[in-house]
Image: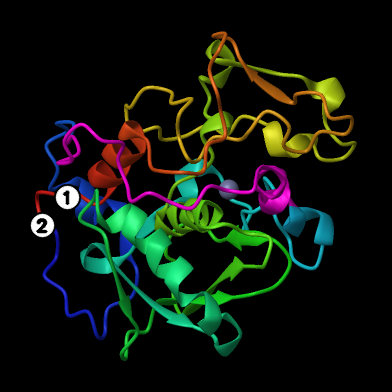
Amino acid sequence: MLKSVNMMDVECVSVSDYATSFNDTHITSNTTGSAPGAAAPEPESSKNKSAETLKEFDQDMPVQEGDILIPESRNAVHTLWPDATTSYIITDELVSREAEIKAAFKMISDVTCIRFKKRDTESSYLKLVTGNGCASFVGCQGGAQRLFFASECTVGNLCHELLHALGLYHEHTREDRDKYVTVNWQNIVAGKENNFKVKHGNTQNLPYDLASIMHYGRDFFSTNGNPTVLPKQSGVEIGQRKHLSQLDIERLNKLYSCGKL
Ligand SMILES: [Zn+2]
């Protein structure tokens, strides 16, 4: 069962604390008809394609897959936010972007049980900072956890980073991805091939999702403008950063046992 916890003194909690209270039924969004998530501002396409890869080129911190700040396998995600609530602080340099930050929170809180609240005395919290690119650790790390929201990043990019912070990895590195996408290794910037390597681990028994906000776009890490990752199904767009897909919503609701809290 999910532990009854006091938000003020609890650290990150384990996945099993949530998972054992979940009956494996897919939870669907309670939205009706319209696309899930709040309408995010249209991303500037040129920025959207690269903002999540800037941190890796910057090389001031160890990253993997462009915007993931800690090298771990998918299975290493074992820390979630207590009571499906993420505390945060916004550093002074980002105060002018508070409306955008709130919009990204809303994209998630509108369609899941996950909530964001300004930090009071919680020991684990997100610290939104600027810097080069957009980047996040995966899962709740404990203590002040930086999440990079630089000028290049859109609200949709920030939402993507928040999903990392909540515990999700990139969709295109799932172990079953070769059934759904083709990776064109010859088009990838030399030395950046590791961003496309499959990571074994938990997919939460949910289908592969080309529409995920956690899926890479066609030309991420492209050295020549040609696609690095292409869906096998023709006419399908990948790499959207406008809203959570239906499966993104299910994945988060499953991870945090929404409806069971
Ligand atoms: Zn990412």
x, y (%) of residue 34?
A: 25, 35
Tell me the quadrant of the picture where the C terminus can be found.
Answer: bottom left
x, y (%) of residue 252?
A: 31, 46
- Colour mapping used in the image: rainbow
Q: Residue at x 56, y 28 (%)?
A: 238
Q: Which residue is drawn at 44% across and 47% down?
A: 168
Instruction: Report whether 205 appears left or right of 179.
Output: left
Which residue is the site of mark 2? 261
Q: Residue at x 16, y 74 (%)?
A: 5
Which residue is the site of mark 1? 258
Report the magenta residues as a range.
Answer: 27-53
* Magenta residue check for 81: no
Main SS of the magenta segment?
loop
- Kindly indicate the quadrant of the structure image that contains residue 125: bottom left
Of the residues shown, which amino acid type is indicated by label 1? Cys
Instruction: Report whether 35 appears left or right of 74.
Output: left
**Neighbourhood count class around disc 1 (C-alpha, 10 Å): few under 14, some 14–19, many 20 upward:** some
Circle 2 sits in a helix, a strand or a loop, which is it? loop
x, y (%) of residue 121?
A: 32, 91
Is label 1 in contact with label 2 (beta carbons under 8 Å)?
yes
Whether 55 is drawn above or below 191: the answer is below
**Neighbourhood count class around disc 2 (C-alpha, 10 Å): few under 14, some 14–19, many 20 upward:** some
Of the residues shown, which amino acid type is indicated by label 2? Leu
Tell me the quadrant of the picture where the N terminus can be found.
Answer: bottom left
